[in-house]
Image (spheres, coloured by chain):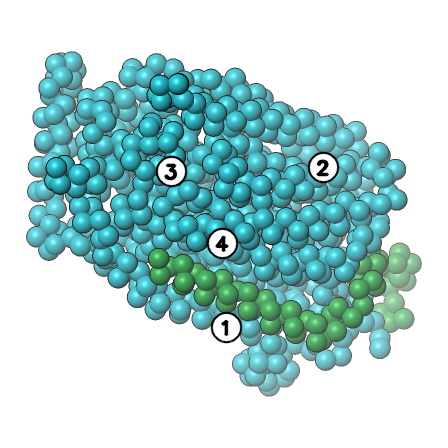
Chain colours: A cyan, B green
Amino acid sequence: MEKEQFYYDNKIVKLFLIATIVWGVVGMLVGLLVAFLFIYPSYLGDISWLSFGRLRPLHTNAVIFAFVGNGFFVGMYYSMQRLLKTRMFSDTLSKIHFWGWQLIIVAAAITLPLGLTSSKEYAELEWPIDIAITLIWVVMGINMIGTMIKRRQRHIYVAIWFYIATFVTIAVLHIFNNLELPVSAFKSYSVYAGVQDAMVQWWYGHNAVAFFLTTPILGLMYYFVPKAANRPVYSYRLSIIHFWSLIFIYIWAGPHHLLYTALPEWAQNLGTVFSIMLIFPSWGGMINGLLTLRGAWDKVRESAILKFYVVAITGYGMSTFEGPMLSFKSLNAIGHYTDWIVAHVHIGTLAWNGFIVAGMLYWLAEKLWKTELYSQKLANTHFWIGTLGVLFYSLPLYVAGFTQALMWKDFNPDGTLVYGNFLETVTQIIPMYAMRAFGGTLYLTGFILLAYNIYKTAKAGSTVEDELAEAVPLKQISGSRLAGEGWHSWLERKTVLFTVLTTVAILIGGAVEIVPLLIVPENIPKISSVKPYTPLELEGRDIYIREGCNNCHSQMIRPFRSEVERYGEYSKAGEFIYDRPFLWGSKRTGPDLHRIGGKYNDNWHFNHMFDPRLTSPGSIMPRYPWLLTDKLDTSTIEAKMKGLVTLGTPYTQFEIDNALHLLNNQAEEVENNLRQDPEYVKNYGDSNMQNKEIIAMIAYLQRLGTDIKKAETAQN
Amino acid sequence: MNIVFFMIIVSLFIAIIFFILFLKSVKSGQYDDLYTPSVRMLFDDEIVEEKKETKTKSN
């Protein structure tokens, strides 16, 4: 058969490449801003939209979805066309995908600092943006599948299988974790409550790691490492086995994020077993990647790109060893909630994701601009600075994590805690936080060198937007829609596309119908004294979410002697049935707050929120002065309560009709409590504090974890 | 904890999709040759230089 000539679309690859570099710098810069807040809590000027709780989600979302996401799209658009010997299915879809994704990122960069967040980690974006993500993701999927349909190469190379897994699984995860009931333009409540919400969130959270930070990067590894080394992958057979086993096992590992919590134990054990099994496919991939360089180690000495890959794959091996180990309950009891987890995550992101993407960008710069890299020396410098950055980032945090765990659990011979004041365990590790910030600075510096190097390369090179290629067409598959053929009969011939579209359709339909049925009966209280939040407490809880308090404070006391001694009675599943979303948190930079209610008086909370250093010298918590001056917005309280009733919270009609009245009454009570302190009367006596946000926050904090105490006092 | 059963169903659903894709790919001969694809991908980028110059449409 005759060869056909056609053109690869290089322009879309270039666009995504530029976006990757720009968002990489932005995302890492926000990370660095946040890292310095640990050392200088007020250096950003105590401005609401620059506070830690709002910037941290911006950092995580930016590096995951903007940097690594765009990085994946760069490699996907470049390699798919070449592996399948065809141009992308539709240039229009490619463009919609590109601009849609960048707009979503901009929307995230605006809404997250404004405190518009659902609080669920790596799924913080509110419902309108969630819908946009779904649409753009499907656009990408159609473009991918369409490209496969018009391919000229029958065999689908292993990298593409990883891309497909990414598309399908992220679609499912994103839809199910973000099922929420909107109550206003940028506020929604999760359809799941408490334990269930936690379960779904970490099923999503872990698989976001698996299918957004692992499978796409493995796909890139299987294309760009052999290319850079000019060696075929060590074992193609292993890559196939490793792919299928990885995707079948990963999806079950989520509950390891919830060990020792109120999640039923069998679910925890299920997560542990699958997490430990995961080491086999993960290391299969790691070994396959490293051994691809067999006989090419002399090239590693010269090539910065190969050096990046070696460290990246080693980092992948390290973090996928650590992950299963941390899923053992005994080790999890030490590592969970500490900075060990932060170090673990950053080995995966900085070394594995960041370096695979960096190596790929350098390699592509030469290919896309048809020239030599501007400076190999600079790329090598980037490699060494970056590697040092990874070490300076992670090693101090490992030390910090162990220090925290040991101090949290340290008992005196008489059975009291050695470090009864949580703050001591924070101030102890501040030097580690400083070293971490230094490591981050190194890493970002390296990345800026990459930006400069690639900019110079692009300037020196020439632009080829449509690259000529040729290949023999496939007889049966090459024809797209036949003339006069209906699109559906065409679709039926294309079983792959049909499967995917059907899946999406079934999932959306299934979600809408099944979820409410399953969720509503669950809201029957299991602990009779646990009651819904009052209107004021509900508003306070939403402020807690807006300020991102859950980024540093957990609300889940594990059943350990050290935790019960420090915080109080361990947390029960039945206590969270009205929590939409759940706020268990994943990291304790500050103490757990589940039993904070009644522990301190209202004035303590008031002063503490105004300036944590007043009540707790040495604290690194942000100041929240705006809570004392901003008026509480009560305009949506009825819509919020009605929404919660729809989801199953038993508010009465009377409570909804009189929501504002009830809210104001409770606010006055709190304000009257505050007036018992003459200092408060002197400074804030005339400032109408009862309608400020701080009052709602105090009401919520004082309610936390107190419902089961009521049951105890009632029994006595 | 009904949600767990629900999620097992969803997870199984994903697994089944992939299982079908797996069977299809095996049947269609995707994995009959486990060596050539790894080498072929190394030679797939650029068109040979002289062809660009002559600009012939067929060969």
Residue A514 tag number: none
Write down the residue under mark 3: A558
Labelled pair 3, 4 in contact (Cβ < 8 Å):
no
The secondary structure type at the circle numbered 4 is helix
The secondary structure type at the circle numbered 3 is loop
Identified by mark 2, the residue type is Val
The secondary structure type at the circle numbered 2 is helix
Of callouts 4 and 1, which one flags the residue occurring earlier in the amino acid sequence?
A: 4
Q: Which residue is drawn at 32% across and 63% down?
A: A518
Of callouts 4 and 2, which one flags the residue occurring earlier in the amino acid sequence?
A: 4
Q: Nearer the viewer, mark 1 or mark 3?
A: 3
Write down the residue under mark 4: A270
Write down the residue under mark 2: A311
Q: Nearer the viewer, mark 4 or mark 1?
A: 4
The secondary structure type at the circle numbered 1 is helix
Q: Are both tags, 3 and 2, on one chain?
A: yes
Write down the residue under mark 1: A502
Labelled pair 4, 1 in contact (Cβ < 8 Å):
no
Of callouts 3 and 2, which one flags the residue occurring earlier in the amino acid sequence?
A: 2
Of callouts 3 and 4, which one flags the residue occurring earlier in the amino acid sequence?
A: 4
Q: Which residue is drawn at 79% across and 56% down?
A: A235
Q: In the image, residue A160 lies at what x, y percent?
A: 67, 60
Q: In the image, residue A485 lies at what x, y percent?
A: 59, 85
Q: Which residue is drawn at 31% across and 47% down?
A: A573
Q: Are both tags, 3 and 4, on one chain?
A: yes
Q: In which quarter of the image is the N terminus of chain A?
A: bottom right
Identified by mark 1, the residue type is Thr
Identified by mark 3, the residue type is Arg
